[in-house]
Image (tube, coloured by chain):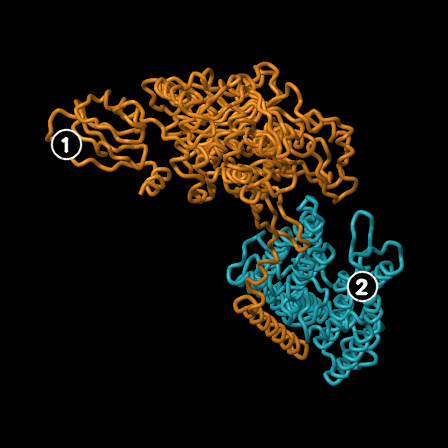
């Protein structure tokens, strides 16, 4: 067809083709060279995020045995009301042994509502539940507009049950620590939830949510405790045994490594299972070795004596009249203030050493009188009583320790505090105080956390240790330790019968405290029987304090706590493979000495010079001459002098690193070289010595 | 067998089917997002299923449209227009009218919903072709030949306008003027007509807050629709994000399966397929205009050109909207957008172009020429020169 329609058609065609070409250019412009605001900046528009609950950090013992870990549990969320709630509840309920009626009540009321229907479904049931939900969806028509999602989260799990539960604590339903380490280190253990970027639509609905729901990869830091699970178990077993044996209401124990201040075990029975903490009352759940205070009794005596020795008020050999068991304290006007008794024995005259060894209340009160009221209060405060130990556990009690200028101090306080009444403290403070004696006067900060492990890279950061602090001079501490050794070595000592460990010297002190009732007076028959001690006395590896509360069978600290101490120590010796240090009875000489001394010393007399001991070739703390001795003889002699050494070679002693007569700065006397050929002698290497105690002692010596 | 005829038919058929198939794929991708908007895992393929059903109907009718002498449409054109006006009236005033997103455009027949305004495109082409081919001599006479036709069309547009479907009404109005131009309308009359149309448009738009904002917004700030569309184009770039990977369909792009489906297409497939789609529509326009030019019969010529240009014009308008070349109007993309009525109507249009091509390109034998002359004469005799 030609004009005019043909021409006009051609015109329109050209126009429309021009339009198409123009659109093509426009597309090129929009797609190949888009304006900046349309590129990439909108990617956040497509991104939403969900938070996956993170794992809580684990709690490990010093050997990385898990004490608190995590396990997976699942929460069932339902969005929208199911078409057939009864069928849903029946299927799910039969899987989980839940009542269908309660399940129906928990289902969402209307469409679009998102509800948590079941929480903390254990991992074992997860597969069965997922299958049941699948089965339910199949029975329904396709139009069931309900979404189910099983969302994982983590639940605290304590694989060892009640082991160290008082220390570890427990977490609540929201996985927040409510006690013990779990509470103190909440911030370290917990971790921010993992943020997962998910695609969303324009209404911020998460698309394909179930594809992204998984277990979080992030985990809070692990806390590594100084607790040794094996020791903890042993101690718990032993004090549980002790509690049962004595029909007591509770028993507690603390085992501490004195040189580092690390707490190896801290136990209280009865304890609780943190996996199911709701079943137990507050008494069982709290960490009683730090939260509960009590009057410690006679275990306080050595510190008073240490104070008196330091002040120069007494010497170890000074003799006091112990009034044959009844000592009436009179005030200035002659009024009777108090009558002090000695429980079992009626002592006549005892040296300071024997007052500790035989635990005379009257004797220690007389020593305290020499020291003065302020001095008693001061020395106890210096040993840490009346304040918290500073361990990383919540709710530690500072106890009670009065000063002469504080409220509640009476003239009687002077005659009660020296044997552990009118004051109160907790187990850990006592243990820490004894470790000061074990360290020969140095205080190290007791702690229960060794370090933290970052689970992301597995790096362990150790807790910073504070430098030890000198509380009392080495010599004074040594003197007190000798007395404490006497408690177990002297046949008259309160710990002689139960607290000895064959082959090892043990230093310790019994304590049998009366218990105050609600009326404020001491209740008859209610006691706390305790024992604090450390071994081996000349190279202490462990300080142990045990106490048993209100024993009904048995009475005294020595026989109850002391015997448990001996058993625990025996196991520890085997666990650590310690070598015995005691070759001949230490006491045979010292007991004779004290007997002879008693004869010519008078109570209240000025300080007398102790008689020179028998011409013993071996003196404690002084390096003996070992040359020419066999290995066995040399070893025995060294041990008698209180040293250890590294033996090298065979034959007789050719060389000793520390020469005879020297006073070494450490318990370790270095190398002893044996051999038959003098040529073999080579310069001895200085071996690793025990740092803290030794050095300060050396400094003091110089 | 005529090579040109076979080529034109094959090309039209292939291009149409290719567009429809691409449309089905993009539609599936775009529809999924609409359903997630509800937050419910519904059947993602529900739109695809419906569209496939309409495709079957469309293919049948397209085949049917090629199988008869298009001159048989002459007597049908006016009744069809009346029927269409009746349907539009039913949409507006009968209880069968069905509203989606505040627009009452559908007729709910119970089992299906049809959109009479889509059918109006076809009926208008047929009516105008019939009307102007019959009184070809009168087309120069503005008052006798043109105004009555415009009044009839105006009635129809007046019923589409308040649905509201202003986009379609303006589209049909301007398309009507274009067909008049092709049919040989007086150039001197066209300019005043265009001016009147512009004034009417301005009054209508100015009277409506929503429309005015759209127009003024086109020149000032970016609307949300256009911003999202531009992001989709930027996302697409050279290679596209991949079929089914469009992120803009996740509720960001409005109307991703109808008006803005081209943005989804661009985002998923990239630049080159976009150009190919433009090329496809241009091919339809070119072939239909080619057939119209070849056709020695004004009726067939106007049908062919009208159908092809309607498809091309609407495609241009739609792509112009999504690329912010023209202000936003609710115009769908032929063959691609979701919507049964539109798909069937456009396929029938292609069928009619093929029909005219069959009749026209049957080979230039003398008998054939003679036949068509005779036919034109007879048709002029049988149809009196009245409206």
Image spot of residue A657 (x, y percent):
22, 34
Image quadrant in which you'd find residue A92: top right
Q: Is residue A567 above or below residue A404?
A: above
Q: Secondary structure at mark 1?
A: loop
Q: Colour of chain A?
A: orange
Asked if residue B190 can be seen in this view, the reply is yes
Q: Which residue is mark 2?
A: B75
Q: Secondary structure at mark 2?
A: helix
Chain letter for mark 1, please.
A
**Chain displayed in cyan:** B
Image quadrant in which you'd find residue B136: bottom right
Q: Answer few, some or many: residues within 10 Å of disc 1's Cα (few below 14, many 20 plus, some between 14 and 19).
A: some
Q: Quadrant of the N terminus of chain A?
A: bottom right
Q: Is residue B200 above or below residue A50?
A: below
Asked whether B220 or A196 is in front, the reply is A196
Q: Quadrant of the C terminus of chain A?
A: top left
Left or right position of A543 against A616: right
Chain letter for mark 2, please.
B
Asked whether A599 or B189 is in front, the reply is A599
Q: Residue at x 47, y 35 (%)?
A: A308
Work out how far the residue at label 1 is from the one at label 2, CA to CA, in angstroms: 133 Å
Q: Which residue is mark 1?
A: A681
Q: Answer few, some or many: residues within 10 Å of disc 2's Cα (few below 14, many 20 plus, some between 14 and 19).
A: few
Image spot of residue B317 (x, y percent):
67, 68
Asked if residue A63 can be seen in this view, the reply is no
Asked whether B384 or B86 is in front, the reply is B86
Asked whether A608 or A391 is in front, the reply is A608
């Amino acid at each position: 067809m030609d004009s005019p329609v043909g021409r006009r058609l051609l015109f329109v065609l050209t126009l429309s083709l021009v339009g198409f070409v123009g659109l093509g250019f426009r597309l090129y412009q929009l797609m190949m060279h888009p304006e900046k605001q349309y590129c990439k900046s909108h990617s956040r528009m497509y991104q939403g995020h969900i938070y996956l609950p993170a794992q809580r950090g684990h709690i490990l013992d010093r050997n990385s045995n898990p004490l608190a870990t995590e396990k997976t549990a699942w929460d069932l969320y339902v969005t929208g009301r199911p078409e057939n709630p009864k069928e849903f509840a029946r299927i799910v309920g039969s899987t989980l042994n839940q009542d269908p009626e309660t399940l129906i009540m928990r289902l969402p009321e209307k469409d679009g509502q998102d509800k948590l229907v079941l929480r903390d479904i254990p991992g074992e049931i997860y597969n069965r539940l997922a299958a049941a939900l699948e089965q339910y969806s199949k029975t329904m028509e396709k139009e069931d507009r309900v979404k189910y999602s099983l969302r994982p989260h983590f639940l605290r799990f304590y694989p060892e049950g009640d082991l160290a539960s008082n220390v570890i604590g427990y977490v609540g339903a929201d996985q927040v620590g409510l006690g013990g380490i779990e509470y103190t280190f909440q911030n370290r253990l917990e971790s921010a939830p993992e943020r997962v970027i998910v695609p969303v639509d324009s209404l911020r609905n998460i698309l394909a949510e179930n594809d992204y729901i998984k277990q979080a990869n992030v985990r809070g830091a692990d806390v590594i405790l100084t607790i040794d699970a094996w020791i903890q178990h042993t101690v718990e077993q032993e004090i549980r045994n002790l509690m049962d044996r004595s029909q007591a209401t509770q028993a507690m124990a603390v085992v501490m490594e004195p040189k580092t201040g690390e707490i190896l075990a801290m136990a209280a029975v009865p304890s609780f299972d943190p996996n199911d903490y709701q079943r137990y009352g507050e008494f069982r759940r709290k960490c009683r070795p730090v939260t509960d205070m009590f009057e410690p009794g006679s275990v306080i005596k050595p510190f008073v004596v240490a104070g008196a020795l330091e002040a120069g008020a007494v010497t170890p050999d000074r003799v006091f009249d112990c009034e044959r068991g009844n000592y009436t304290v009179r005030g200035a006007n002659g009024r009777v203030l108090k009558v002090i008794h000695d429980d079992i024995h009626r002592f006549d005259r005892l040296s300071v050493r024997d007052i500790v060894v035989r635990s005379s209340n009257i004797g220690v009160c007389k020593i305290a009188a020499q020291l003065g009221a302020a001095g008693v209060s001061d020395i106890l405060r210096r040993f840490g009583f009346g304040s918290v130990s500073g361990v990383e556990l919540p709710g530690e009690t500072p106890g009670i320790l009065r000063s002469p200028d504080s409220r509640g101090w009476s003239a009687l306080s002077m005659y009660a505090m020296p044997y552990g009444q009118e004051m109160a403290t907790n187990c850990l403070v006592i243990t820490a105080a004894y470790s000061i004696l074990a360290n020969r006067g140095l205080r190290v900060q007791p702690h229960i956390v060794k370090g933290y492990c970052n689970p992301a890279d597995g790096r362990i950061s150790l807790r910073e240790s504070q430098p030890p602090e000198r509380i009392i001079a080495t010599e004074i501490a040594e003197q007190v330790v000798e007395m404490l050794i006497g408690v177990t070595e002297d046949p008259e000592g309160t710990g002689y019968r139960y607290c000895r460990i064959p082959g090892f010297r043990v230093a310790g002190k019994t304590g049998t405290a009366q218990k105050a009732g609600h009326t404020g007076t001491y209740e008859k028959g209610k006691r706390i029987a305790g024992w604090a001690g450390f071994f081996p006395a000349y190279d202490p590896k462990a300080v142990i304090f045990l106490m048993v509360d209100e024993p009904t069978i048995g009475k005294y600290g020595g026989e109850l706590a002391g015997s448990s101490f001996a058993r625990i120590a025996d196991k520890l010796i085997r666990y650590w493979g310690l070598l015995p240090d005691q070759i001949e009875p230490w006491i045979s000489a010292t007991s004779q000495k004290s007997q002879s001394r008693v004869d010519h010393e008078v109570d209240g007399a000025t300080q007398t010079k102790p008689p020179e001991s028998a011409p013993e070739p071996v003196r404690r703390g002084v390096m003996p001459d070992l040359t020419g001795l066999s290995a066995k003889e040399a070893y025995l002699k060294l041990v008698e002098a209180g040293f250890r050494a590294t033996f090298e070679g065979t034959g007789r002693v050719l060389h000793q690193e520390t020469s005879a007569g020297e006073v070494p700065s450490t318990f370790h006397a270095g190398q002893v070289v044996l051999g038959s050929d003098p040529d073999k002698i080579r310069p001895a290497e200085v071996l690793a010595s025990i740092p803290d105690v030794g050095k300060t002692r050396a400094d003091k010596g110089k | 067998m005529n090579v040109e005829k076979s080529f034109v038919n094959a090309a039209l058929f292939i291009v149409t089917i290719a567009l429809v198939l691409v449309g089905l794929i993009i539609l599936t991708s775009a529809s999924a997002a609409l359903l997630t908007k509800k937050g419910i895992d519904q059947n993602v393929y529900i739109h695809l299923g419906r569209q496939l059903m309409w495709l079957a109907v469309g293919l049948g009718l397209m085949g049917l449209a090629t199988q008869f002498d298009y001159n048989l449409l002459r007597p049908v054109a006016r009744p069809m227009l009346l029927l269409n006006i009746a349907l539009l009236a039913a949409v507006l005033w009968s209880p069968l009218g069905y509203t989606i997103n505040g627009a009452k455009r559908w007729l709910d027949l119970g089992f299906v919903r049809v959109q009479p305004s889509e059918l109006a495109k076809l009926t208008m082409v047929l009516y105008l072709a019939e009307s102007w081919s019959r009184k070809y001599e009168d087309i120069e006479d503005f008052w006798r030949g043109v105004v009555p036709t415009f009044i009839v069309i105006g009635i129809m547009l007046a019923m589409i306008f308040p649905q509201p479907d202003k986009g379609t009404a303006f589209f049909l109005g301007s398309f009507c003027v274009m067909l008049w131009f092709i049919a040989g309308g007086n150039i001197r009359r066209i300019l005043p007509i265009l001016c009147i149309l512009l004034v009417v448009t301005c009054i209508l738009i100015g009277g409506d807050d929503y429309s005015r904002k759209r127009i003024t917004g086109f020149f000032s700030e970016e609307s949300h629709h256009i911003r999202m569309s531009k992001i989709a184009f930027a996302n697409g770039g050279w290679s596209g994000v991949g079929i089914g990977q469009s992120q803009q369909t996740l509720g960001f792009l409005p109307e991703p399966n109808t008006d803005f489906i081209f943005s989804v297409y661009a985002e998923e497939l990239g630049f080159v397929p976009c150009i190919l789609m433009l090329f496809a529509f241009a091919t339809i326009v070119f072939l239909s205009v080619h057939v119209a030019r070849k056709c020695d019969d004004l009726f067939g010529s106007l049908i062919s050109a009208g159908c092809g240009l309607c498809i091309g014009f609407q495609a241009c308008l739609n792509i112009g909207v999504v690329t912010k070349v023209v202000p936003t109007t609710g115009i769908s993309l032929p063959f691609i957008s979701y919507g049964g009525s539109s798909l069937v109507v456009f396929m029938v249009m292609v069928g009619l172009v093929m029909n005219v091509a069959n009749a026209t390109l049957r080979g230039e034998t003398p008998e054939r020429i003679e036949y068509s002359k005779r036919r034109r004469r007879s048709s002029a005799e049988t149809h009196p020169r009245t409206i």
